[in-house]
Image (cartoon, rainbow, N blue to C red):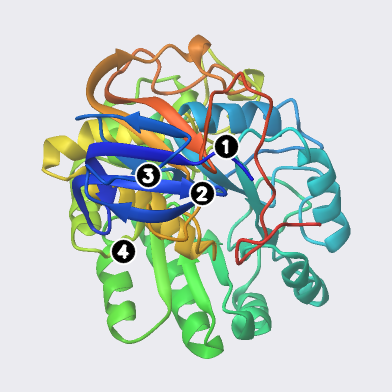
Amino acid sequence: MSETLLIRSRRMVVGDGVREAAAFVRDHRVEAIGDYDLRVDADRTVDLGDLPLLPGLVDSHVHVNEPGRTEWEGFATATRAALAGGVTTICDMPLNSSPVTTTVDALRAKIAAADGQCAVDVAFWGGAVPGNLSDMEGLLDAGVVGFKCFLIDSGIPEFPPLDRDGLRAAMKALAASGAPMAVHAEDPSQVTTPSSASYDAFVTSRPPVAERRAIETVISAAAFSGARAHIVHLSAAECAALISSAKAAGIALSAETCPHYLFFAAEEVPEGHTEFKCCPPIRYAVNREALWRALGDGAIDGVVSDHSPCPPSLKGLPDGDFRTAWGGISSLQLGLSAVWSVARRRGFSLADVSRWMSVFPASLAGLPSKGRIAVGCDADFVAFDPDASWTVRGADLLHKHSLTPYEGRTLTGRVTRVWLGGAEVTPDDPPRGRLLARGGGPLGG
Ligand SMILES: [Zn+2]
């Protein structure tokens, strides 16, 4: 029996609002929620006063890259960075580890690599690639939260894209499970080779229509199969209308965007700074504002990091070439502060941010005990000072590599304390994260 905890805050994110409340925790879960002055005998009482308390974030899009590319990122570094940033659950993508997570054996290798070194809870996506239809059921039984696939070259030869028919077949195979198919939606027929090394040429080579055509393919596969589809890292805001109308037509479809698409704009990407390269690209400011509207009206459901680091040498800095640099942005530790910095300016609340960064990703990954401060849920909490201003120094981050496009940026809002399963934790503590299966049970047990 673990010690009981009573935690009070005058600004607790509960339900869909922020209010004065107290949460009582027993055996790692929230047992009761009451008024701020709730009287219960607890082993430990924490009174945060006006400091907001949020549900721990769930980042359903993280590339940990271990085993096989542990020099890019690893479970120890990624999960410590997550904890420092208020993320208490991550879902690891099936690439760019080696092996890629497209078989049960590969999932076992990943579980073995992660076991014992995770500072936060970790769940895993499986990969859908040509030829692994027969592996999907086993991966689902073994506990993956869903599948990820590409419709365009992933950059990793052992993780090739699905074509239209392959996508339909894979979605048919998982329809009965209710697990989602998360799709990297860019249509290769609409992508060209950049005409120069510049950022503008790179953005032009991957136009919004590439996302739009691919999302149309996904929508028709979802309609055909009845499976749940999820668009990862939506960048082209014009696709919001397409997504909304598919939802209105009853298609099981959701979409995420990422902090970098909401924070940066193409106009401000300095030439040669390939730490800003990701696919699809960060687009122009007008697109960024339209993404914010799509989040506000619910066309886009969530915000997750797509943390995808690589060794800095693969970025070709200091004079990076946007044609050849490896794509991927490193921001796992920064997502909450980055999004809050720009969300509050646009009139959004901490409850909105929690809905995008905790509630939605938990539901996408089928983790019902995560993402909310609610009776029966895991006692994963984040105390967050919404007014603290601080400047990002990559060298101070706990990611494996310090390179980040947020270098030198001043952010508003800082994580001050974190609880995982009712225990207050810091990145320096012995790792106590668990490995989770879809549904929230233990993985690989
Ligand atoms: Zn990704």
Give the mark nearer the N terminus: 2 vs 1.
Answer: 2
The residue that label 3 is drawn on is 204
Residue at disc 2, secondary structure:
strand
Mark 1 → mark 4, Cα distance in angstroms: 23 Å
Q: Provide the residue designation for mark 1.
A: 308
In the image, residue 145 sits, relative to residue 205, either above or below, namely below
Which comes sooner in the sequence, label 2 or label 3? 2
Mark 1 C-beta to ligand 1 under 8 Å: yes
Residue 160: x percent and y percent?
71, 58
Counting from the top left corner in percent of width and height, residue 146 is at 62, 66
Can residue 235 be seen here? The reply is: no
In this view, the residue farthest toward the right is 105
Q: Where is mark 2, residue-wise? A: 26
Q: Is there CB contact under 8 Å for labels 4 and 2?
A: no
- The earlier-in-sequence mark between 1 and 4 is 4
Of tags 4 and 2, the one toward the viewer is 2
Q: Quadrant of the N terminus?
A: top right
Compared to residue 184, the image places residue 79 above or below, namely above
Ligand 1 neighbours mark 4 (CB distance < 8 Å) = no
The residue lying at 40 percent from left, 51 percent from top is 358
Q: Secondary structure at mark 4?
A: helix
In this rendered view, identify the residue nearer to me: 242 or 398. 398
User: Is residue 46 rendered to the left or right of residue 277?
Assistant: left
Residue placed most toward the observer, 424 or 65: 424
